[in-house]
Amino acid sequence: MPAGPVPGPAAVVGGEAAQQDAASWSPSTVEVERRAYRRSRATRSAAVSAVSTVVVLGVLAWLVTHSEGWPRVQETFFSWDKAVSSFPAVLKGLWLNIRLMIVCGISILVLGLTLAIMRTLRGPIFFPLRLIATVYVDLFRGLPLLLLLLLLGLGVPALRLPNVPTELVFWGAVAIVLSYSAYVAEVFRAGIESVHPSQRAASRALGLSNGQTLRHVVLPQAVRRVTPPLMNDFVSLQKDSGLIAVLGATDAIRAAQIETASDFNYTPYVVAGVLFLCLTIPMARLTDHVARKQGWHGAGGAL
């Protein structure tokens, strides 16, 4: 193969000179002062934020702890002994919530994406699929999740139909999947429709079929664009998994209720709330991080 063009002496000398200039460059006095000023402003802002936070929280803590009814509130909601004794049972119940979140989350993604694709299919031949998907979304997005839980979790097992499961957890999971998949389908549909039609046209011009265009061009962009909203829905799913307690399943909330019933001390509910916060807060911060990384500059705000 013929060798590429050899740089001339002038180009070599120019490159060496540029490297020397870059190595010997140092910021001007004005730039050094500007950087020092920015550092001082950042340090001052951090100090003011820390002091103001400590003062506000300190004042609030003093007002709460010195109020007239604080001893009774502390004994009823923040009893350390009750928290320690109820923690194992509540933690064991939380494991049911975690398993429910994982199984329902995967099912919701699959069903929601399928519904979104059905609603975005083009052509008169696909009208029945679009109609089914639209009716599904309108129906289950309009029904309260609690109502679905009661209808399916209590109503279906009461029918005693042959070869139909009667487990409360199963029908609770079905109700959650039906409700959330309707919302997630609309999120996916928004992502699919946000892809410019010119990209579909370009893909078709390159010889890709409709299915190949959807798989290789449209869906990758759509999923990437709606990742933050999907993660936000998963945060909501983490909380709403506790609604299964209304069916009698022993999750974290139901376990806290059982522990509370012995002496009417509501500290187990606080323990359950803290455990749920340990799940939702990291996921919420991860959602904000992903949103900012993808250009959603307003995500999460500035702390």
Image (cartoon, helix red, strand yellow):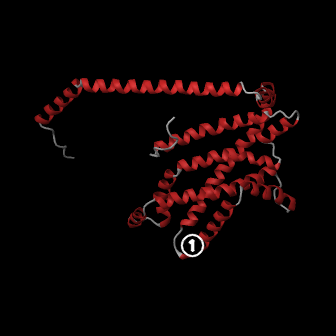
**Looking at this view, is 214 or 57 the one in front?**
57
Binning the other alpha carbons within 10 Å of mark 1 as few (below 14), some (14 to 19) or many (20 upward) gives few
Name the residue located 45 percent from the left edge and 59 percent from the top edge. 195
Name the residue located 88 percent from the left edge and 33 percent from the top edge. 263
- Count of marks, rendered view: 1
Question: Could you say whether the residue bearing mark 1 is in a helix, strand or loop?
Answer: helix
Q: Quadrant of residue 86?
A: top right
Three-letter code, disc 1:
Phe
Q: Quick one: which residue is furthest to the front in this view?
A: 68
Q: Quick one: which residue is furthest to the bottom in this view?
A: 124
- Residue 114, image x, y percentages: 60, 61
- Residue 8, image x, y percentages: 12, 37
**Looking at this view, is 103 or 152 the one in front?**
152
Q: Quadrant of residue 14?
A: top left
- Residue 81, image x, y percentages: 80, 25
| Residue 26 visible in image | no
**Looking at this view, is 92 or 262 the one in front?**
262
**Looking at the image, residue 20 lies above or below residue 103:** above
In the rendered structure, the answer to whether residue 126 lies left or right of residue 208 reads right
- Residue 243, image x, y percentages: 75, 48
| Residue 277 visible in image | yes
**Looking at this view, is 80 or 287 the one in front?**
80
Name the residue located 56 percent from the left edge and 38 percent from the top edge. 285
In the rendered structure, the answer to whether residue 25 lies left or right of residue 150 reads left
Please give the residue where the numbered disc 1 appears in the rendered image.
Answer: 126
Name the residue located 60 percent from the left edge and 40 percent from the top edge. 283
